[in-house]
Amino acid sequence: MLKLKFIDKIQNTKNLLGFSGGVDSVSLFFALLKSNICFDIAIVDYQIRDSSKDEVAYAQSLAKFYKKKCFVWQSNKIDGDFERKAREIRYAFFENLIKEYGYEYLLLAHHLNDRLEWFLMQLSKGCGLNTLLGFEGIEDRGSYQIIRPLMNVSKNEIYEYGCSYKFYEDISNQDSIYKRNAFRLSYSNDLIEKYGNGILKSFEYLRVEKSLLYKKEEILFWAGIYYFKCDSDITNLYWVDKILKKMGYVLSAKQREEILKTNFSLGIGEKYIIQNNQMWIFVCREMINPPILPKRFKNITRENKIPKRIRPQIYLYFHDNGIEFKEMQTCLKKKFAEYQ
């Protein structure tokens, strides 16, 4: 039996399992069944493998036999940067289902080898502790949480458990042209096999040290904008990353570098805005059709050091709530009292 984490948390809750037909998600599927966890499944067909239709059919047959819902999304074919685009498609699909059907938790089959692969890849680039550790066992995404029950389980343990069930092998996982595969085939699998217990202990020690380094700060939310007090670059990047994940967006390594280069003032993915005014860092969605701002309002926000790119969100909040110009100054001073 696989040692699943966070089982108590997902008992008697509404859960969605991200499914692929591979040994990881198949093993998690049956381990959850044996633990009497209620869940439905969701699978994406990226149309890149001949077996993808069989994998979808297998997911549907499992769901039918065990009386679960099976949601399927057929993606358009992806050109370039497959991993990033596939992740965006996958999470958008999952989040739409979560919103429509009211799931509380998204269950994913990431495991110990995945954690080490990520760690080694980031170590080779030069990264801080937060980036090195990558995903967490429980991750808050605002309206739902991601749970990774297999995060402390090795790939070998998963194979041993899953060998009695039908699953599909993704042959592209053996292609070392992909950086992640190269690290997996050359380093992480052998390291886990030889030193898995020690590596797991190290991850636990690092997780505790991370919690001490990145002490919980108050993330404020107002007018559709997340904001927090400026700190060191490393700490600021940690909280920006947390906020964007909560909003459903995962930063790439290049985007992290760009955030630091621009001193936390840029647009991300043509969807999000990050702005820094030396006192606060602001994160919000970029408006598609921003309103025209009255001169008087511009003066008020300028006096309160509100960055230009987040002013439309604040104006719309004032407008929608019927707040007059004479009240805006007082409201902003109250929200950002540290300026005074």
Image: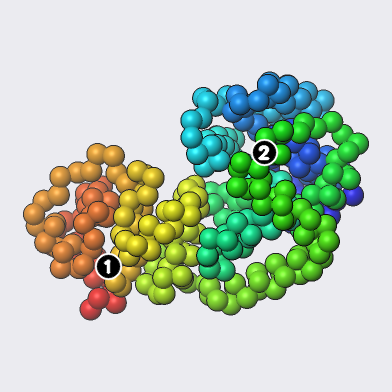
| Residue beneath the point at 38% across and 63% down | 260
Residue 95 in sight in this render: no
Asked where in the image residue 108 lies, by quadrant, the reply is top right
> Residue flagged by tag 2: what amino acid is it?
Asp
Q: Quadrant of the C terminus?
A: bottom left
**Badges 1 and 2: C-beta atoms under 8 Å apart?**
no
State the residue position of label 1: 277
Looking at the image, residue 77 lies above or below residue 123? above
Which type of secondary structure does the marked residue at label 2 adopt?
loop
Mark in the foreground, 1 or 2: 2
- From the top left corner, tell me how far across and down residue 109 is, in percent: 71, 46
Which class describes the residues within 10 Å of circle 1: few (<14), some (14-19), or many (20+)? Answer: some
Near-viewer residue (246 or 185): 185
Looking at the image, residue 188 lies above or below residue 73? below
Near-viewer residue (306 or 331): 306
State the residue position of label 2: 175
- From the top left corner, tell me how far across and down residue 36 is, in percent: 83, 44
> Residue flagged by tag 1: what amino acid is it?
Asn
Label 1, label 2: how many angstroms apart (C-alpha)? 45 Å
| Residue beneath the point at 76% across and 25% down | 58
| Residue beneath the point at 63% across and 75% down | 209
Which class describes the residues within 10 Å of circle 2: few (<14), some (14-19), or many (20+)? Answer: few
